[in-house]
Image (spheres, rainbow, N blue to C red):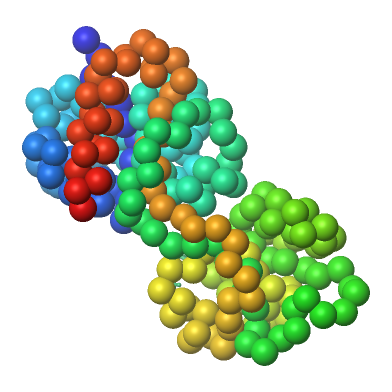
Amino acid sequence: MKPLRIALTKGRLEKDTVALFEELGYNCDAVRNKGRRLILPIDNGEIEVVLAKAADVITYVEHGVCDLGVVGKDTILENGTGFFELLDLGFGRCKFALAGKKGADFFGGYNVKTIATKYPNVARTFFEKKGMDIHCIKIEGSVELAPLLGLSDAIVDIVETGSTLKENGLEVFEDIVPISARLIANNASLKLRKREIEEIVDKMYQAIKER
Ligand code: PRP
């Protein structure tokens, strides 16, 4: 039987997921000593871990080359829904927020506001719900620079500890939505490998519940 493939978002979510697998009794030595390898066996090769960037985790799961994936709700909200969301894993907690220069009257005036963000879909949905017309500029990282440089009136971005905003003279104008890591599954895999997936999901669910 082919190993069950799970795509992990490289970095912090990968580490938190490996810790969870180890708590469930899976041997993750190969992942811990991975070097530059990107596909690694866990637990005698019954499960295979694939290390990918967040948006690519969704692509691999949607296309069915990975059965499961661990990815942040931020990436899910931005990148579509052609898969099944199985579990809130409870780690990787942060939030989407609208933020800008401290003391700025963002909601005042009638001019169309410019929003800088790495997450244009999230930003557009947020302002559509408010019935507010905006101009959106896509930024690839350190989005906080945009209002500081005068490119935008505000940003839609991830806030975790709030230090990046604080240290740059910015503040949250409004919270948008809480974020955490999610376990996702390919729709066909859920049917074809139901038993194996259920087994692992049940174990994860129990461990998370007890945390
Ligand atoms: C994220 C986010 C903020 C920062 C928030 O950026 O875009 O910049 O973390 O964290 P804090 O509230 O704890 O300060 P990341 O470090 O992922 O890098 P990026 O800006 O290049 O996307």
Who's the residue at 60% across and 61% down the image? 176
Who's the residue at 32% across and 14% down the image? 193
61, above or below 88, in the image: above
Q: Given the current orientation, which residue lies at the most extreme right position?
A: 110
Who's the residue at 9% across and 37% down the image? 25
Residue 184 position in % (x across, y down) = 41, 34
Q: Given the current orientation, which residue lies at the most extreme front position?
A: 210
Position of 83 with respect to 170 (left or right) is left
Position of 125 with respect to 132 (left or right) is left
Image quadrant in which you'd find residue 129: bottom right
Residue 204 position in % (x across, y down) = 24, 37
Position of 30 with respect to 17 (left or right) is left
Residue 6 position in % (x across, y down) = 31, 31
Residue nearest the viewer, comparing 133 with 50 = 133
Image quadrant in which you'd find residue 110: bottom right
Who's the residue at 65% across and 84% down the image? 101
